[in-house]
Amino acid sequence: MAKPGIPKGTRDFSPVEMARRNYIFNTIREVYALYGFRQIETPALENLSTLMGKYGEEGDRLLFKVLNSGNFMAGLRAEDWNEEKLGHLATLLCEKGLRYDLTVPFARYVVQHREEIQLPFKRYQIQPVWRADRPQKGRYREFYQCDADVVGSDSLLNEVELMQIIDEVFKRLQIRVCIKINNRKVLSGIAEVLGAADKLVEITVAMDKLDKIGWDSVKDELMAAGLDEQAVEKLQPIIELKGENSEKLAVLRDWLSTSPTGLLGVDELAFVFERLEKAGLQNCCELDQSLARGLNYYTGCIFEVKALDVEIGSITGGGRYDNLTGIFGLPGLSGVGISFGADRIYDVLNQLDLYPAAIEQSVRLLFINFGEAEADYCLQLARQTRAAGISTEVFPDSVKMKKQMSYANARNVPYVALVGADEMRDGTVSLKDMVNGEQKTLSIEEVIRLISENA
Amino acid sequence: MAKPGIPKGTRDFSPVEMARRNYIFNTIREVYALYGFRQIETPALENLSTLMGKYGEEGDRLLFKVLNSGNFMAGLRAEDWNEEKLGHLATLLCEKGLRYDLTVPFARYVVQHREEIQLPFKRYQIQPVWRADRPQKGRYREFYQCDADVVGSDSLLNEVELMQIIDEVFKRLQIRVCIKINNRKVLSGIAEVLGAADKLVEITVAMDKLDKIGWDSVKDELMAAGLDEQAVEKLQPIIELKGENSEKLAVLRDWLSTSPTGLLGVDELAFVFERLEKAGLQNCCELDQSLARGLNYYTGCIFEVKALDVEIGSITGGGRYDNLTGIFGLPGLSGVGISFGADRIYDVLNQLDLYPAAIEQSVRLLFINFGEAEADYCLQLARQTRAAGISTEVFPDSVKMKKQMSYANARNVPYVALVGADEMRDGTVSLKDMVNGEQKTLSIEEVIRLISENA
């Protein structure tokens, strides 16, 4: 029989991997809670009508669709079975799909529950999402997102606090990062000043390539996109803009002086940077005028986080959107959010080996099983150690000592208790420290004290 | 525009609901860990070949199947579009499905990762499962299971520890329960003694109805199932068996004296009950000879938990299976497990109102926003309270005081800080205790001390 497998792009997580992932999730969760964000969950299954049309044509194709239960052919006509109109047929066969991100379900949630929600609504959500993307290294079809959003407040203090959250999370995880910040209004202003509002995408794509391909190639790309020589020359100082955030802001404010939208963006960035300076962040925050972010629903500040010590794409991102719930019939609610990329953060921590050693010592004490009478006796001792909060196992089978010790080693157990006839008679425990190999004869109360003190 | 909704049988969980659910999940998680169980996760998407044929015909129909991505019509012939053979067509359209429980994915996991696993393997898993069941009160299409299993050990000490875990979890949750225990070998023995091994299902179904329909109706059912008068009379004392566990065991041992299988089952039960008596459980453990459990893969002890103070079905169940991984080509591995029904436990806690009050106070301190300068100042104070581990919010907008206070009330915030021009000048905080309405002028250090002491 062939070894069973799992669908490509999906993963099993072993106990060690889960301990590491929980370390990441718990860190994020704790910091979100420290800032007053509260957790919600939404179902994995959403109506396709909720999901379709929200992620572009490509996104619609990448949605996992769930076959209707019961007679999924009921009501279909022969002409519906048409390979040319797969998308249409799919919506006839499937009413439900798996969520693609946490943002659209959140928008749906806010609209559906608007009467119960107190604004501003600060929620976080840590759940898997599914995308029928081609799997490749570091890209999965099922992966977790860790989002926090505030809706119902257009105060830029929310942006400031989200940056503080990012800083605190990476400080706790001991990952050195740079937080890059830009503003979509600045980008719109740039295109506006150039008289090329329709070429915003091409301009930002080209700007982002400066470090990789150099100015001459960027220039070629911009010309190919339809900008004239004069516009490209005007743009050069913006693309090559370097220096302190305050210097960049001064240049942008000057350059964008004819664009009210652009100036508003500069004001927003100035407000945020001014407060971040006072906030004493541990990581750097940098105005990156080439930062665009893929999704086009952002309308204000946008963020992205780069790890400094590992070559990897952005490990966190986010931004402000002014009308997320509008697609579900509730216009006028502004929101801002961030999303930690748990899988990439996991890769970074693995590469830098930054996990605390304790997270892999899940069991603190193992009682060796010398036979039925001894095991019964140990069961009683284990009740006491567990009551003291010590994670304890009694080896269930009285197999060879060597096998039980190799289990203890594989499980990374720091203390092993050997209780045979002598110990039972004397009311003692022979406790072996698996790290230094020392063995001591102790009372169970002393065992509890010793292990608790070394936790 | 119509209010958006979610698929029937699925649920959103609000912050309050999540706090309550996390209280349940964390309690279960902590107790599992205390007994040395370690967490794994498996993907929501499994290959349909892994899932099909594992839950009976009905189960196959209730699996949610995921439409193949890309051209799902490729390779299909006209005759495949046949309403008479929906099941076949579904497997052509869908290679993947959503997991139906955590047991089959666990068996698959053990076989797939057998080289990495140290036996006995004690794992727990808390994840959602999906079933295309008809939704009804208390039955959902997407719901969480919380399983713990040990595979690779046939020691009955595992059964004993799992009962201790059940007892501990419900003790911590303050739910009074009765743990019912039976053994499939006893049931097989009963059918064997009656010479009706093929009528095991009918016999157990009828036995289970005694309390509801009385002996005469049970008798009618047994006769209708094909048992003769003599067999039914022989069975009566077993069906009506009452008393202490030791008394029941004595009667069963006598009654089953001609069935080696039945006697083995009695021995297993005796072993477990003897140790449970010494374990000092808080809740009762009762031999229930009518307990059968739906799934037919159990081969040894079986368990079910009933809440004593709420009318509801079983809230936890489990049992021993001798060959779970055999279906994936790895025979001979015995296992035993339990599964907490989180949704029913949630209903029980709601009905009895047993949640600790603290779980709904997610934010401890809210700074009122009196304007830009005050908010900037409060941002600095909030850095200090957060550094002290106090979950803190600064209201992001300087809207009317009344609105901010009503937010504080809705969020159940115990302390509100008012910092205006006077407080900024004096370096103080006016702290309002939202429970007793008292207001004090304090330094930020005093605020931190006061809130920390009242956590």
Image (cartoon, coloured by chain):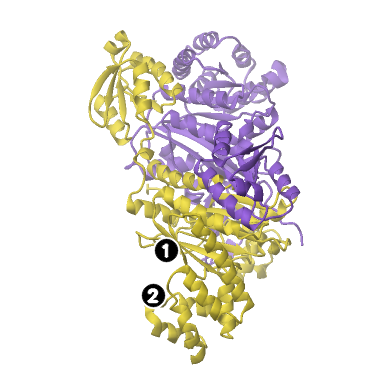
Chain colours: A yellow, B purple
**3D distance between C-alphas at marks 2 and 1:** 15 Å
Mark 2 Cα-neighbour bin, 10 Å: few <14, some 14–19, many ≥20: few
Quadrant in the picture for residue B83: bottom right
Give the camera-side residue of A318 and B144.
A318
Quadrant in the picture for residue A320: bottom right
Judged left or right of residue A345, residue A132 is right
Q: Is residue B101 above or below residue A237?
A: above
Residue A211: image tag: 2
Residue shown at 72% from the left, 63% from the top: A331
Dot 2 and dot 1 residues touching (CB under 8 Å): no
Q: Position of residue B292 (x, y in %)?
A: 57, 26
Residue A313: image tag: 1
Q: Residue furthest bottom?
A: A229
Quarter of the rendering occupied by the C terminus of chain A = top left
Image mark 2: chain: A
Q: Position of residue A384 (x, y in %)?
A: 42, 19
Q: Amino acid at mark 2?
A: Asp
Q: State which mark lies toward you, 2 or 1.
A: 2
Q: Position of residue B90 (x, y in %)?
A: 57, 56
As helix, strand or loop, the secondary structure at mark 1 comes to: loop
Mark 1 Cα-neighbour bin, 10 Å: few <14, some 14–19, many ≥20: few
Judged left or right of residue A180, residue A323 is right
Residue shown at 47% from the left, 14% from the top: B270
Q: Is residue A285 above or below residue A26?
A: below
First in sequence, mark 2 or 1: give its number.
Answer: 2
Q: Position of residue A240 (x, y in %)?
A: 43, 78
Give the camera-side residue of A364 and B57.
A364
Residue shown at 71% from the left, 17% from the top: B214
Residue shown at 35% from the left, 48% from the top: A354
